[in-house]
């Protein structure tokens, strides 16, 4: 047994993929739910970490949601995520845990940041207003890790910044889902109902970087083995992106739907591009192993087993 690992957010998409990765079998993974440990409670969090004395912590928990949820509840997204980040990181420090991998978000980058987005550009410009509170909380957690390392050279508290993710255990409900699971659901429904067309918002030329969640899990386990090899903050991504039209076409190919796509040019499309620089990741010796088609096929199999009507 390699040791004991405390995983926050173990019930979410990222957490479930981390737990199901082959490397997890060598560890005792603790992934308590919120009923067992309320991470917004500083005392409860600190007491749990002190009692368990994990060898390493992977912090993947947080209050998450789409644009509408972030805009409707900015206080909760700021306050709860600041509390969770602070409580886990400071609880780890108080318990003498020397290794911590903090998972952040590309929403920390300036809204007008130049693509590809480089780690050194964080805090160089205003944030995207629609999820500013969440972003500020993620920046706080990253900087807290930086400050702890500055005070204690033994502390390996490092931050990984994943690009957009998709995969098994994603949300497929159209009211709550992100782009790729929404496309899978929409194209599957079209095939089931015999629909000839599927509508795409905008002209479909906006570009997005979506990585298979199992690949992030792979990078996390590599980081767990040797946090000292990591820079303080590092993007985890593909280093290339695809157009919205590409995602629709690939999903249609996997599902076997042969209709045509229409475009509603009156609909909002968001940023034209959001791409991570992967220079640090490449130097670290890792790249995402799963192709877009393979990742969508694995995700569609999960959808068929757990969500398809």
Image (cartoon, rainbow, N blue to C red):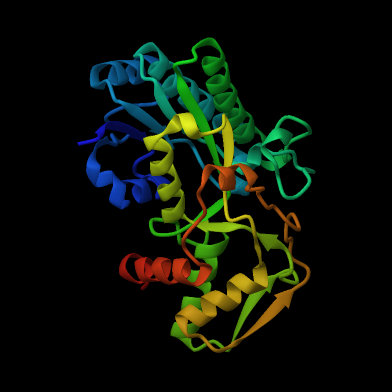
- Identify the residue shown where x is 51% and y is 34%: 230
Picture layout, residue 281 above or below residue 2: below
Q: Say left or right for 67 vs 63.
A: right
Picture layout, residue 58 above or below residue 285: above
The percent position of residue 303, horizontal first and vertical second, equals 38, 67
Q: In which quarter of the image is the N terminus?
A: top left
| Relative depth, front residue between 39 and 280 | 280
- Identify the residue shown where x is 46% and y is 77%: 188
Residue 106 position by quadrant: top right
The percent position of residue 130, horizontal first and vertical second, equals 69, 42
- Identify the residue shown where x is 28% and y is 45%: 24
The percent position of residue 213, horizontal first and vertical second, equals 45, 54
| Relative depth, front residue between 12 and 215 | 215
Residue 69 position by quadrant: top right
| Relative depth, front residue between 162 and 271 | 162
The percent position of residue 250, horizontal first and vertical second, equals 55, 76
Q: How many marks?
A: 0
Asked whether residue 308 is in view, the answer is yes
| Relative depth, front residue between 267 and 27 | 27
Q: Say left or right for 37 vs 231.
A: left
Q: In which quarter of the image is the C terminus?
A: bottom left
Residue ranking furthest to the left: 1
Asked whether residue 34 is in view, the answer is no
């Amino acid at each position: 047994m390699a040791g004991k690992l405390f995983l926050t957010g173990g019930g979410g998409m990222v957490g479930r993929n981390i737990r199901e990765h082959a490397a997890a079998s060598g560890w005792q993974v603790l992934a308590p739910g919120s009923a067992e440990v309320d991470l917004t409670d500083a005392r409860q969090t600190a007491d749990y970490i002190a009692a368990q004395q994990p060898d390493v912590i992977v912090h993947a928990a947080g209050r998450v949601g789409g644009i509408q949820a972030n805009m409707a509840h900015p206080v909760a997204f700021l306050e709860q995520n600041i509390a969770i980040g602070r409580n886990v990181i400071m609880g780890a420090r108080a318990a003498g845990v020397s290794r911590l991998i903090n998972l952040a978000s590309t929403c920390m980058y300036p809204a007008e940041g130049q693509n590809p987005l480089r780690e050194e550009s964080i805090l160089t410009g205003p944030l995207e207003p629609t999820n500013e509170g969440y972003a500020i909380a993620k920046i706080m957690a990253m900087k807290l890790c930086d400050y702890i390392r500055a005070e204690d050279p033994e502390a390996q508290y490092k931050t990984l910044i994943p690009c957009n993710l998709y995969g098994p255990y994603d949300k497929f409900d159209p009211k709550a889902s992100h782009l790729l699971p929404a496309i899978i659901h929409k194209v599957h429904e079209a095939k089931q109902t015999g629909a000839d067309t599927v509508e795409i918002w905008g002209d479909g030329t906006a570009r997005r970087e979506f990585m298979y969640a199992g690949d992030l899990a792979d990078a996390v386990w590599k980081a767990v083995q040797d946090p000292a090899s990591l820079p303080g903050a590092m993007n985890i991504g593909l280093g290339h992106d695809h157009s919205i039209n590409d995602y629709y076409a690939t999903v249609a190919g996997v599902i076997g739907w042969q209709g045509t796509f229409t475009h509603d040019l009156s609909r909002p499309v968001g940023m034209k591009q959001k791409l991570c620089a992967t220079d640090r990741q490449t130097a670290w010796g890792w790249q995402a192993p799963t192709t877009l088609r393979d990742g969508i096929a694995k995700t569609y199999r999960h959808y068929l087993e757990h969500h398809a009507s």
